[in-house]
Image: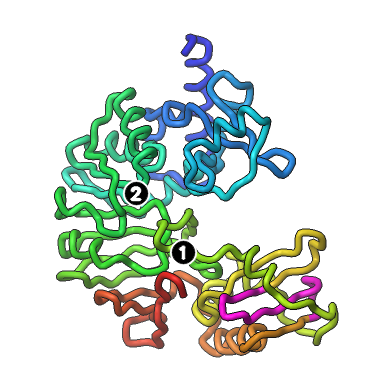
């Protein structure tokens, strides 16, 4: 890089760190120093940017390259698991596809790294290498020899390893199914998953020392977010849902059906329906207190949106159940169909939530015993609900 571009990158990195500190995402001195030291641009020689409904290709030297990299935003690096999509977008001026890999928002990365509660000498496994940037932050904080990172995509692993090598970090990097952990370098004091899961893979707890921690995000279409679990013996553990939120692309084995496909399969609707005093936003907005409990009560239910009418929102489920919401005011019209009445279930859940004292996400915990995984409220002896697994 030219000296002027290096200076610009350094200035933008300092501004990013200042913004993360100002917003409360980055508070601990060792992580502040890591974010100041590790150049995000070294791991993003190219990426996709959204423009006019398509994905355009951005690379080193483009005007938007450095400003986008040092903004606190997700940068998509892969579409449809296709390594050729970027070249196609560059050649044709844009392309379409579903994001399947990204460099996460720096704020979410900072939150997860601080929630990991690492200390010097701890051995850490990262699930989801991606670009390698998060692994570099871990290496800066702990040292290369204590960091392992795995990703199922060999092409991504090769690229990340090259970027890590170029900036002087050499952790253990391997292409493998992240749900299986990394037995060859276990046991770990901490496991950090930077992709989301619908249930906790038992191997992660089996490979974590008793008393160690697993931090990951739950892949739930409603009620997602961060959890931290303290490992017990074998595939057991218990922990909490965290107040600070974070949402990531899912582990490949934990992906769900595209809601657009579920929406396309719905029968024609009348456009009428009954009034409801419960706004749909209360159910699907992570900023609302009810959303996490709504996800517990409506497992596998996914929001979907009308491409032509911004006032219309659907809830859909793979079993064919659906509800259509016209408006998001104090009163809305709701139409339902399929084998279950989803909105009736949502209203019942809201009444139950109010009877429980309107608990927020951080009042819930999680217990894991192999494949038996449950949420509980306020204490392990409180009310319990099953945690859904892949395909639910």
Q: Which residue is mark 2?
A: 152
Q: Is residue 328 magenta?
A: yes
The image quarter containing residue 172 is top left
Q: Is residue 151 something that shows in the picture?
A: yes
Q: Is residue 62 magenta?
A: no
Of residues 192 and 37, the one nearer the viewer is 192
The residue drawn where x is 30% and y is 40% is 138
Of residues 141 and 101, the one nearer the viewer is 101
**Residues at circles 1 and 2 in contact by the CB criterion of under 8 Å:** no
Q: Position of residue 368 (x, y in %)?
A: 29, 74
Label 1 vs label 2, nearer the camera: 2
The residue drawn where x is 79% and y is 61% is 310
Q: Which residue is mark 1?
A: 219
The residue drawn where x is 67% and y is 72% is 265
Q: Secondary structure at mark 1?
A: loop
The image quarter containing residue 96 is top right
Q: Secondary structure at mark 2?
A: loop
Q: Position of residue 176 (x, y in %)?
A: 28, 49
Density class for disc 2 (Cα within 10 Å; few <14, some 14-19, many ≥20) is some
Q: Position of residue 383 (x, y in %)?
A: 40, 88
């Amino acid at each position: 890089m030219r000296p002027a571009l290096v200076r610009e990158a350094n200035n933008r990195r300092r501004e990013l760190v200042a913004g993360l500190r100002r917003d409360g995402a980055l508070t601990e001195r060792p992580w502040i120093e890591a974010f100041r030291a590790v150049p995000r641009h070294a791991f993003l020689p190219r990426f996709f940017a959204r423009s006019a409904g398509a994905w355009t290709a951005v690379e080193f030297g483009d005007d938007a390259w450095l400003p986008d990299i040092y903004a606190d935003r997700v940068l998509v690096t892969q579409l449809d698991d296709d390594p050729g999509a970027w070249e196609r977008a560059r050649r044709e001026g844009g392309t379409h596809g579903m994001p399947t890999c990204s460099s996460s928002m720096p704020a979410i990365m900072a939150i997860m790294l601080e929630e990991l509660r690492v200390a010097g000498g701890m051995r850490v496994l990262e699930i989801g290498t991606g670009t390698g940037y998060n692994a570099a932050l871990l290496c800066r904080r702990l040292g290369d020899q204590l960091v392992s990172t795995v990703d199922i995509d060999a092409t991504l692993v090769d690229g990340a390893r090259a970027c890590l090598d170029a900036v002087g970090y050499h952790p253990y990097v391997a292409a493998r199914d992240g749900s299986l952990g990394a037995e060859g370098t276990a046991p770990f004091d901490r496991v950090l998953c930077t992709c989301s899961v619908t249930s906790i893979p038992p191997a992660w707890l089996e490979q974590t020392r008793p008393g160690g921690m697993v931090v990951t995000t739950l892949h739930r279409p409603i009620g997602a977010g961060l959890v931290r679990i303290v490992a017990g013996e074998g595939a057991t553990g218990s922990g909490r849902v965290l107040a600070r939120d974070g949402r990531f692309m899912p582990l490949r084995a934990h992906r769900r059906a595209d809601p657009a496909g579920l929406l396309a399969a719905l029968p024609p609707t009348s456009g009428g329906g009954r009034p409801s005093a419960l706004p749909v936003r209360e159910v699907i907005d992570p900023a609302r207190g009810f959303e996490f409990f709504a996800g517990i009560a409506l497992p596998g239910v996914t929001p979907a949106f009308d491409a032509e009418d911004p006032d219309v929102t659907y809830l859909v489920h793979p079993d064919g159940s659906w509800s259509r919401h016209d408006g998001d005011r104090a009163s809305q019209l709701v139409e339902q169909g399929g084998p279950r009445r989803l909105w009736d279930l949502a209203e019942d859940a809201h009444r139950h939530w109010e009877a429980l004292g309107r608990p927020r996400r951080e009042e819930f915990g999680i217990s894991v015993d192999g494949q038996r995984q449950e949420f509980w409220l306020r204490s392990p002896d409180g009310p319990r609900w099953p945690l859904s697994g892949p395909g639910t």
